[in-house]
Amino acid sequence: SIWHEARERGINDPAAATLPDMAELEAAAEHTSIQCLKIDRESGTAYLDDPQASLDVGAVAKGYALEMVCQTAPEGLLISVGGNVKATGAKPDGSSWVVGLQDPDGDTGEYLHTVYCTGSSVVTSGDYQRYYTVDGVRYHHIIDPDTLMPAGRWRSVTVVCEDSGRADALSTALFILPLEQGEELLESFSAEAVWVDAAGEEYMSAGFSELLRS
């Protein structure tokens, strides 16, 4: 929320844009442990045992909601909710849908790649949509919990897997993690991904190239 408020102020008044105070970020970080969340599955309850903690589901809620919609939607649809896309089956003619992946570097309208999609989800996390600028440097909305600053390894990460909620969570996690750790996490969920770094270099998981149309 500290970064969100700073970003909103910077967007509304670019000339007065500033970074959050690091001391304030460090104090807030003392109340961000997942261990604060206590889930009682038997009684169906959840609570936070730290009164200064709060629960933000922004990294997964849109993907989860899309997944719930698709479970009862007719077959043969392609549903897009921002950076989250899911197909409920092939097109009526039996062919695959084609989903474009935005080029993080440009406003040209060109795609980085296009991928085939039949019954899977395609979710992208990137630094090019929700951001503001301070002294000529762009600061986006995906915060690295180790540095308390916007994660700087990647420009975008696109994940393809069956479950849209899982893809949403994975794309955010992979955006923060180093490549090797991200690949290990991806494999544990039987998903595929493509990473784009600050220099424009691309890294694909083993099976991602099989999904490419272009």
Image: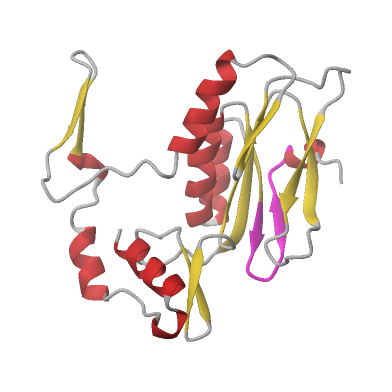
From the image, which quarter does the N terminus lie in? bottom left
Left or right of 145 in this view: 103: right
Image-based side of 46 in relation to 104, left or right: left
Residue 48: percent from left, percent from top: 16, 38
Q: Which range of residues does the magenta coloring cover?
A: 195-207
Q: Residue at x 60, y 45 (%)?
A: 83
Q: Position of residue 10 (x, y in %)?
A: 42, 74
Name the residue at 43% across, 72% down. 12
Q: Would you place residue 212 above or below residue 128 in this image? A: above
Q: Position of residue 182 (x, y in %)?
A: 54, 48
User: Which image quarter: residue 44?
Assistant: top left
Nearer the observer, 33 or 93: 93
Residue located 21% across and 74% down the image: 23
Count of labels in the image: 0
Q: Residue at x 37, y 41 (%)?
A: 57
Q: Quadrant of residue 122?
A: top right
Splitting the image into 4 quarters, where does residue 109 fall?
bottom right
Camera-side residue of 88 and 174: 88
Answer above or below: position of 134 versus 121: below
